[in-house]
Image (cartoon, rainbow, N blue to C red):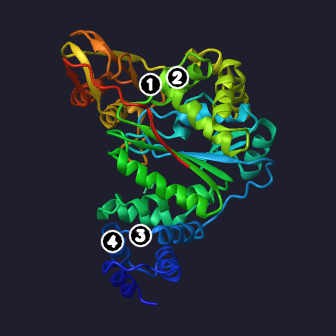
Amino acid sequence: MRMVDIIEKKRDGYKLTREEIEFFVKGVVEGSIPDYQASALLMAICLKDMDEEETLNLTMAMVASGDQIDLSEIPGIKVDKHSTGGVGDKTTLILGPIVAACGVPVAKMSGRGLGHTGGTIDKLESIPGFNTELTRDEFIKAVKANGIAVVGQTGNLVPADKKLYALRDVTGTVRSIPLIAASIMSKKLAAGADAIVLDVKTGSGAFMKTVEEAKSLARAMVKIGNGAGRRTVAVVTDMDKPLGNAIGNALEVKEAIEVLSGKGPQDITEICTTLAGKMLDLAGKGDFKSCKAQAEEAIRNRSALEKLKLMIRRQKGLEDVVNDTNLLPKASYVKEYLAPEGGYIESMVSDRLGVASMLLGAGRATKESQIDPAAGITLLKKPGDRIEKGEAMMVLHANNPELFEAAVKEIDKAVRISSQKPADLPLILDIIE
Ligand code: URA
């Protein structure tokens, strides 16, 4: 087989066979296919698309490129969740304990943040002492004992994605539904869960800027999951505004604890009970309506909060943060961001707030950057709220007061105030089974 023939075939809009796709993925990982040929095929896929079967074959070839986690030692149906990324998205910290409290095991591998989006592992590590680096044995034992463990990615999961993503990033080939779907789903399938709930975000803070694009991506991923024999459901959610009121690692842990105590913001509570309801539904705990009610009850009776505490204890973190969030790292300096004019907050562009939070120290500009667990932003007002000129709209947290200036400049660009109250978009836009 010759790579140039495969490139030409896709360039001319023809369907690739499983053997051709496997040849490509294997060659990329082994290094026998040079970057320029791999990039040419990626661009041809971007322009000519892939059908359902090709996308599934690409995903499965990527899964086969590395380790696959075996969770069969843990009894019960294991359900994983993936969110397509967002600013202030602390759903894993909330969902995991809820689902575990309802009797479904959560064996979760999560990532670190890069740039303006936060990673669950960075958030958990803002809890003093919390260890995200368990061995495989410790991980499985923790899930068996408490029903939940969240750890950083270990092993050599989907090396094909690491190579392909790095190429896509610099060749203008990230925005392709089959490539995004295969990239995300290959990692989910390799992580070993029996069923998968996807939270596909749309809006200014998300990869998919329009609802239609988000639905197409959701459909492509659901087809891959089901095609691979894992029950998969996608919930399309709005990310035009940040989720909840906190952006930044310790600030988000504090908010997650508030949600699990029944005192969190309504938007994030609603998204979490919906996603948890879907996870429980896939795990056979009843129909969606009764599963969502179980998720709400786990918050009300504090059993989910208790699960979070057990997980923190098992992973050597300071469990008292659950009862006293003042024990989480706190920034030495705070500064209020005041409304430049009065009116209704029309929009707060989530990615810009994410960048502002990163500039305060909460994110990484490069993979090597150190993050400040205490840094970030607390929103006092959200889009749709009325605000007076000079009223505090948010609070910025940093350990170096010199960082405020650049963050404020970014927030100036993020916020739009208007005399009209903006239309309220629903948070949950669609559910794709
Ligand atoms: N996230 C991924 O993991 N892969 C993509 O291609 C896009 C977003």
Callout 3, which amino acid? Met
Instruction: Tell which circle, 3 or 1, labels the residue nearer the N-terminal end.
Output: 3
| Cα separation between marks 2 and 4 | 44 Å
Q: Residue at x 46, y 75 (%)?
A: 28
Assess whether mark 4 and mark 3 are in contact (beta carbons under 8 angstroms). yes
Identify which residue, 183 or 123, lies in the foreground.
183
Callout 2, which amino acid? Glu
Q: Which mark is residue 255?
A: 2
Q: Which residue is mark 4?
A: 48
Q: Which residue is mark 3?
A: 50
| Cα separation between marks 3 and 1 | 39 Å
Callout 4, which amino acid? Lys
Question: Judging from the image, what secondary structure is the residue with disc 3 in?
Answer: loop
| Cα separation between marks 1 and 2 | 7 Å
Question: How many other residues sit within 10 Å of disc 1, few (<14), some (14-19) or many (≥20)?
Answer: many
Q: Which residue is mark 1?
A: 246
Image quarter of residue 145:
top right
Assess whether mark 2 and mark 1 are in contact (beta carbons under 8 angstroms). yes
Question: Judging from the image, what secondary structure is the residue with disc 2 in?
Answer: helix
* Residue ranking furthest to the bottom: 1
Q: Examine the rendered structure and indicate whether residue 53 appears above or below residue 348.
A: below
Question: Judging from the image, what secondary structure is the residue with disc 1 in?
Answer: strand
Q: Residue at x 50, y 81 (%)?
A: 23
Q: Examine the rendered structure and indicate whether residue 279 appears above or below residue 58.
A: above
